[in-house]
Amino acid sequence: MAVPMLDLSKQHAALAGELCRVFEAVLKSGRFVLGDQVESFERELAEACAADVAVGVSSGTDALLLSMMALGVQPGDEVITSPFTFFATAGCVARLGARAVFVDIDPQTYHIDADQIAAAITPRTRGVIPVHLFGQCADMGAITRVASDHSLWVIEDAAQAIGARDALGSAGTLGHAGCLSFYPTKNLSALGDAGACLTQDAELAQRMKRLRTHGDVGRYEHAAIGGNFRLDALQAAMLRVKLPHLRAWNQQRRECAARYHAALRDLPLALPVARSVAHPGEGSREEPRRESGENPGEGLGGHVYHQYTVRVRGGQRDALRDHLRAAGIGCEVYYPIPLHLQACFGSWGHQRGDFPHAEQAAQEVLSLPVYPGLSAEDQQAVVDAIRRFYATGQS
Ligand SMILES: *Cc1c(COP(=O)(O)O)cnc(C)c1O
């Protein structure tokens, strides 16, 4: 039985009627960029994410770029981030003429190691971009503490973590800005490219909205140099249809993860480690953030399994990947090359060995199919294929 890495067809079949209706509504409205649909989506998204303001933008990448522009990143500035993430996190830093200063990851969670951040701070450091990789929040308590001790901003790259929670609150609301992506593979997906910035800072939101439209303050008067980072009305309308389902979809991802956990426990694989999420306020000196909805920490809670990523021991990762693909089981390596070893960042002068945990993760990680609508039978096929690999003593 073939199991794809991701299959949105069930999700879209169930919503097709509604999606087509809102398409017609936007077509009739004649308003295709920003406008009512985008404003309504921004309000609904902010509510769902427990943020004060959401600013709809053209992609997750542009959310990162716009957040840094609004926070005043200049050429020569330094921004601390993880070397084990999607390219855009550091690519946006470089596009502004700034330098990404990498800090190695915690090998258990794959997040930036908060204990190593202080040592990377220099007089040029302006901020930190933690990445909530694979759907789980980085250690935001420790990260925001070191950042505020050094007067740095924090931009959460929450592209993979909409709906996830940290002990302190919801992903994307714990730093100065939070960046979301609605790329079609993400937990909440548009029918194309789209993204959003979240913030609790009304002034920052105002700057973001201006910079989103070339810094225009009205009637072609430009107060700052921005760009075209606008969200389309059609994408906003599609996202408004899907947003009410996000909680249930994330819950289904957690159920898939629990089934993998139970079925793979005895194999020589390191399974994802879900950091325990204490109730807001517990175990931290910070005040809990505003909650939306009853049962904080439960419905939205913890890890949202954007990916279910295992670590394959014994140098067998590529062999297991090839075995699964030959059996028709989708799987992917996120990410095979850590960012400090990307040729285009060569001027930053890194070499192999600089961030050993990120490099080892790049050699060992393998992500398995996990998505709402993945049936127990599909998952059993994935598990059976993995078991066959180890039973036949492949190497
Ligand atoms: C997807 C992703 C982005 C970029 O989002 P796009 O919408 O594809 O531009 C940035 N960071 C991370 C960690 C991502 O997974």
Image (cartoon, grey):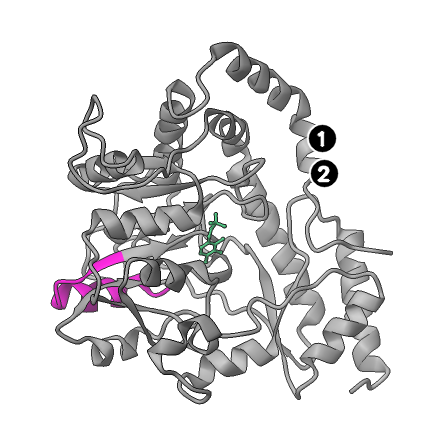
- Residue visible at 34% across and 63% down in the picture: 94
Q: Residue at x 67, y 82 (%)?
A: 268
Q: Is residue 231 left or right of residue 260?
A: left
Q: Residues within 10 Å of mark 2 (few under 14, many from 20)?
A: few
x, y percent for residue 179: 37, 49
- In what element is the residue under mark 1? helix
Residue 223 image offset from top left, x and y in percent: 15, 36
Question: Label for residue 365?
Answer: none
x, y percent for residue 117: 26, 75
* Left or right side of 86 for 266: right
Q: State the residue at coordinates (87%, 56%).
A: 1
The image quarter in which residue 267 lies: bottom right
Rendered location of residue 284, percent (x, y): 23, 62
Vertical arrangement, residue 3 with respect to residue 225, above or below: below
Relative placement, left or right, of 315 versus 343 is right
- Residue that extends furthest to the front in the rendered view of this protein: 220
**Disc 1 C-beta below 8 A from ligand 1:** no
Q: Are marks 2 and 1 in contact (CB under 8 Å)?
A: yes
The answer to whether residue 39 is above or below residue 332 is above
Q: Report the magenta residues as a range.
A: 137-154
Q: Secondary structure at mark 2?
A: helix
| Pointer 1 residue | 13
State yes or no: residue 109 in magenta: no
Q: In the rendered structure, which amino acid carries the disc numbered 1?
A: Ala
Q: Which residue is mark 2?
A: 9
Q: Is residue 384 visible?
A: no
